[in-house]
């Protein structure tokens, strides 16, 4: 199969997960031409990573996943062991920039572009390991014992009369993850925000290497704790595609129940925090109360408040009996009623709306420019949701039967992201009721015998956006390479744009309205 | 304003006893609160530092401030600067990239400078362990008074850990 008239043959990935096609680019020029065609067709750069294939194929491999109307196109490009370079895609997809820098830091394959236009600064490597050592190369060794040298980072300087900088982080003022924000401001107005991330880089991708399939899912569930179900499902889906296994229908229903409960929990927490950041502590108390009720029900019936380790390759690690399903339905009614009442209060609160309405706007063109997915993209009016039907796209089971209605809002700012979160809570509650009532009978887990040398890609619509996990197995059926991709990679640069021309005190509010993952990004 | 007041009245005070938690757990929370107050007399200020976690532990630390657990109602509060803190609540593993910032935060925390290592990763390095990118447990980088294991630890386990630290 071919896409967009480009001469690259794609083959559909096996299995019942999200539609993924896999192809190989003959050379760098073919990759560039395909990327240009995708960008012209309003497609997205979904993920980019590298792998060391010198033992198997004599060189390195670049993997680029594009988001198309029909699903995902996973394109690989083989690179020679000596001088492994590939064309810089950041001019076509700005989101490629940081992904390419991370790929160079970890695998040692670099984008070759215009020497003035290609960002050569390290991204995840702050100084904990030397510039000529690459952790994801198979001959790298463990890499213990490097001196942890602090390094300077060349932030882009903004000059001019009255311009000054505000450095923030890596430790932020609240109970949140670490990262550095460099604001260039005049007075209180933000001229430019530049992020420096990578502080919570803990070597996740290297840890996957050599693990068996079951060990891998435990790690995948800890890439970003607030999205543990999304990552575990995406990993499981990739493994199932690689090994040609379909999880039983009941397992898919249980996974969807968990994913939607994860979505609701995060939206409840963030809506409370958004009220609080705009000075309405009432909102925080009310939503945190609802969230706690929600987490306690998770603890009671799923055995874990965040449902960690409840999704396995092949299916689910638990089953729910009728009383549990009835309790889930009943809680949907209660939370739905309460969230509706709170929405009315938020909508009618002049002080709150005054803060929400004008802050943090981005438009659909910018969302496309940065290949944004998830709630931030839908809040600019883009209809993008891996669970929902759209022109030319049929979602995988169990979503196809549920008729998921994606929530959208065209205003693009904090108010739009708040509105989308509310709408998604109500839609998720509807889905949870349907899933609980219509859960198919049968087994909850299938055997997954590893297929040596196989590979697969899993895609799941997490609460932030599209979570992808690429997996390849080695000759012994263990994990050779796992690459988890968080939607925050695309959203962090969009956030830099969302705060421009807003005032510094609005940053916490704008930031919270996205609530991006540091851990999922830094890996 | 009126709908808001009505909702506040209708919600009432949920802090005692927490529904779903069971009477046993509610009593335990009340007892812990009482004991923390008795030992501290006034208040405890906590600075949380994420030194590399997957953000799961942070979700449960947030839950400490929900109306059910209602820490702030008992004089325990989270502060923005380590200079204002009696205690550092540190989640791990400590990444190499955060080791310097964690040490700096510890250096400027005044006595009694209590340190709670939170979560399996904060206690031992957890699934991430020690590697080219991770120093592992919090105690590899700064001295630790009390360890609260769990992946992530529940709010109740965190409360118990805070109490264990102030008892010392």
Image: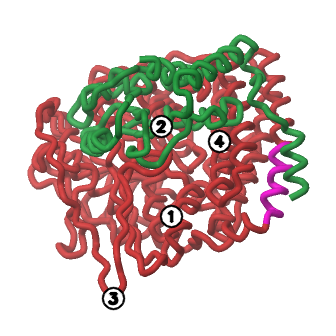
Chain colours: A red, B green
Towards the viewer: A205 or A73:
A205
Dots 3, 2 in contact, CB < 8 A? no
Name the residue located 54 percent from the left edge and 38 percent from the top edge.
A226
Left or right: A410 in relation to A45: right
Look at the image and tell me in which quarter the C terminus of chain A lies.
top left
Q: Name the subunit of mark 3.
A: A
The CA distance from mark 3 to mark 1 is: 41 Å
Magenta-span inclusion, residue B27: no
Residue under numbered circle 2:
B46
Dots 4, 2 in contact, CB < 8 A? no
Q: Name the subunit of mark 2.
A: B
Name the residue located 69 percent from the left edge and 23 percent from the top edge.
A250
**Range covered by the magenta-colored residues:** A338-349
Q: Position of residue B117 (x, y in %)?
A: 39, 26
Whichever of labels 3 and 4 marks the residue nearer the N terminus, that label is 3
The circle on residue A161 is: 3
- On screen, residue A145 above or below B78: above
- Tell how many labels: 4
Residues at marks 1 and 4 on the same chain:
yes
The circle on residue A263 is: 4
């Amino acid at each position: 199969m071919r896409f967009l008239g480009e001469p690259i043959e794609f083959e559909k990935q096996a299995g019942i997960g999200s539609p993924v096609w896999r192809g190989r680019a003959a050379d760098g020029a073919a990759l560039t031409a395909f990327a240009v065609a995708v960008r012209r067709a309003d497609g997205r750069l979904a993920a980019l990573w590298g792998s060391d294939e010198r033992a198997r194929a004599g060189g390195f491999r670049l993997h680029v996943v594009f988001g198309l109307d029909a699903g995902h196109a996973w394109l690989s490009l083989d690179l020679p062991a000596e001088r492994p370079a590939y064309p810089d895609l950041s001019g076509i997809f700005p989101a490629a920039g940081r992904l390419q820098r991370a790929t160079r830091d970890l695998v040692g394959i670099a984008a070759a572009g215009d020497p003035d236009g290609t960002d050569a600064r390290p991204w995840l490597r702050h100084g904990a390991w030397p510039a000529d050592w690459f952790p994801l190369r198979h001959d790298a060794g463990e890499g213990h014992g490097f001196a942890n040298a602090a390094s300077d980072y060349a932030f882009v300087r903004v000059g001019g009369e009255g311009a000054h900088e505000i450095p923030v982080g890596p430790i932020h003022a609240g109970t949140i993850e670490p990262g550095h924000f460099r604001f260039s401001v005049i007075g209180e107005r933000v001229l430019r925000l530049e992020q420096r991330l990578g502080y919570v880089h803990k070597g996740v991708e290297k840890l996957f290497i050599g693990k068996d399939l079951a060990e891998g899912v435990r790690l995948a569930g800890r890439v970003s704790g607030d999205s543990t179900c999304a990552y575990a499902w995406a990993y499981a889906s990739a493994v199932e595609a690689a090994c040609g296994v379909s999880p039983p229908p009941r397992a898919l229903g249980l996974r969807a129940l968990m994913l939607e409960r994860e979505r609701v929990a995060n939206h409840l927490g963030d809506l409370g925090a958004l009220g609080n950041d705009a000075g309405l502590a009432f909102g925080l108390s009310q939503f945190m109360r609802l969230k706690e009720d929600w987490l306690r029900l998770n603890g009671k019936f799923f055995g874990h408040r965040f449902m960690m380790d409840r999704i396995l390759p092949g299916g689910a690690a638990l089953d729910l009996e009728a009383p549990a399903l009835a309790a889930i339905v009943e809680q949907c009614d209660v939370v739905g009623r309460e969230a509706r009442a709170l929405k009315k209060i938020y909508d009618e609160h002049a002080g709150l709306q005054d803060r929400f309405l004008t802050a943090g706007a981005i438009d659909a063109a910018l969302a496309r420019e940065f290949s944004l997915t998830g709630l931030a993209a839908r809040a600019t009016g883009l209809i993008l949701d891996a669970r929902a039907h759209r022109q030319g796209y049929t979602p995988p089971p169990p979503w196809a039967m549920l008729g998921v209605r994606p929530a959208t809002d065209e205003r693009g700012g904090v108010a739009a992201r708040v509105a989308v979160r509310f709408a998604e809570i109500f839609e998720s509650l509807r889905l949870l009721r349907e899933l609980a009532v219509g859960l198919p009978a049968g087994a909850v887990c299938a055997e997954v015998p590893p297929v040596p040398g196989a590979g697969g890609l899993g895609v799941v619509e997490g609460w932030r956006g599209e979570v992808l996990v690429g997996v390849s197995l080695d000759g012994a059926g263990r994990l050779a390479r796992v690459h988890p991709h968080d939607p925050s990679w695309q959203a962090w640069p969009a956030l830099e744009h969302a705060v421009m021309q807003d005032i510094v005190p609005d940053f916490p509010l704008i930031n919270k309205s996205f609530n991006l993952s540091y851990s999922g990004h830094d890996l | 304003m009126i709908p808001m007041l009505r909702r506040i009245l209708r919600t009432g005070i949920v802090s005692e006893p927490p529904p779903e938690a069971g009477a046993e757990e509610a009593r335990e929370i009340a007892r812990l609160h009482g004991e923390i107050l008795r030992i501290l007399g006034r208040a405890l200020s906590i600075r949380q530092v994420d030194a590399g976690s997957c953000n799961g532990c942070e979700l449960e630390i947030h839950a400490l401030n929900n109306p059910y657990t209602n820490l702030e109602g008992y004089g325990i509060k989270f502060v923005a600067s380590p200079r204002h803190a009696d205690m550092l609540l540190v989640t791990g593993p400590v990444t190499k990239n955060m080791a310097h910032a964690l040490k700096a935060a510890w250096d400027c925390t005044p006595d009694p400078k209590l340190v709670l290592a939170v979560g399996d990763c904060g206690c031992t390095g957890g699934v991430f362990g020690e590697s080219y990118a991770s120093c592992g447990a919090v105690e590899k980088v700064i001295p630790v008074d009390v360890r609260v294991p769990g992946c992530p630890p529940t709010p109740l386990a965190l409360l118990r850990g805070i109490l264990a630290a102030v008892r010392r």
